[in-house]
Amino acid sequence: MKSGNECNFFFTFELLLIALNNALIIVPTYNEKENINFLIDAVFALPMSFDMLIVDDASPDGTAQLVKEKQKQYNLRETRLCLMEREGKMGLGTAYIAVFGLPWKKITNTCWKWTPIFRTIPKI
């Protein structure tokens, strides 16, 4: 017999999975050439459906160009990987502010933020 706490846990977990499906993951970047391909591949390999928005602050190492190459791989049937290129290094906080100012349907769903440094490995 399940206790009330177990029922609440499973109900909450199921709602979390529903909310995570089709969530938007926002990734601000600056000079992340070494990490960005791995991060994008790891997110799209997850068993859930996510969209990603990379917000690049004019990385001189070519991060944005690598994202554009990945867009060719992941945007075949629908746009799942987006890139916002900004004119200079404006910082992490302003990257999120710029995203939330967009009239974009996906932003009304769940938003996650990730840094490509891999302090946490994406997994569900």
Image (cartoon, grey):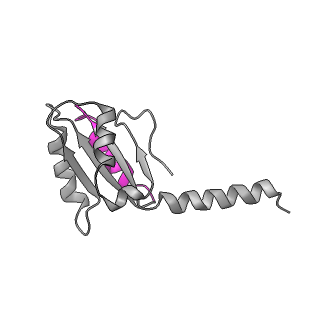
Residue name at image x 76 percent, y 56 percent: 6
Residue extending farthest to the right is 1
Residue 104 forms part of the magenta stretch: no
Identify which residue, 82 or 108, lies in the foreground: 108
Residue name at image x 36 percent, y 32 percent: 117
Q: Could you tell whether 64 is left or right of 54 in the image? A: left
Counting every numbered tag in the picture gives 0
Does residue 72 lie above or below 64 as drawn? below
Identify which residue, 81 or 36, lies in the foreground: 81
Quarter of the rendering occupied by the N terminus: bottom right
Task: Tell me the quarter of the picture where residue 35 sits.
Answer: top left
Residue 47: x and y in percent read 45, 59
Residue 31: x and y in percent read 22, 31
Q: Could you tell whether 83 is left or right of 107 in the image? A: left
Residue 91: x and y in percent read 28, 30
Look at the image and give the residue range highlighted in magenta: 29-47
Does residue 91 lie above or below 2 as drawn? above
Identify which residue, 9 or 47, lies in the foreground: 9
Residue extending farthest to the bottom is 77
Residue name at image x 20 percent, y 30 percent: 89
Identify which residue, 38 or 85, lies in the foreground: 85
Residue name at image x 45 percent, y 54 percent: 110
Residue 44: x and y in percent read 36, 55
Q: Could you tell whether 18 is left or right of 7 in the image? A: left
Does residue 54 lie above or below 12 as drawn? above
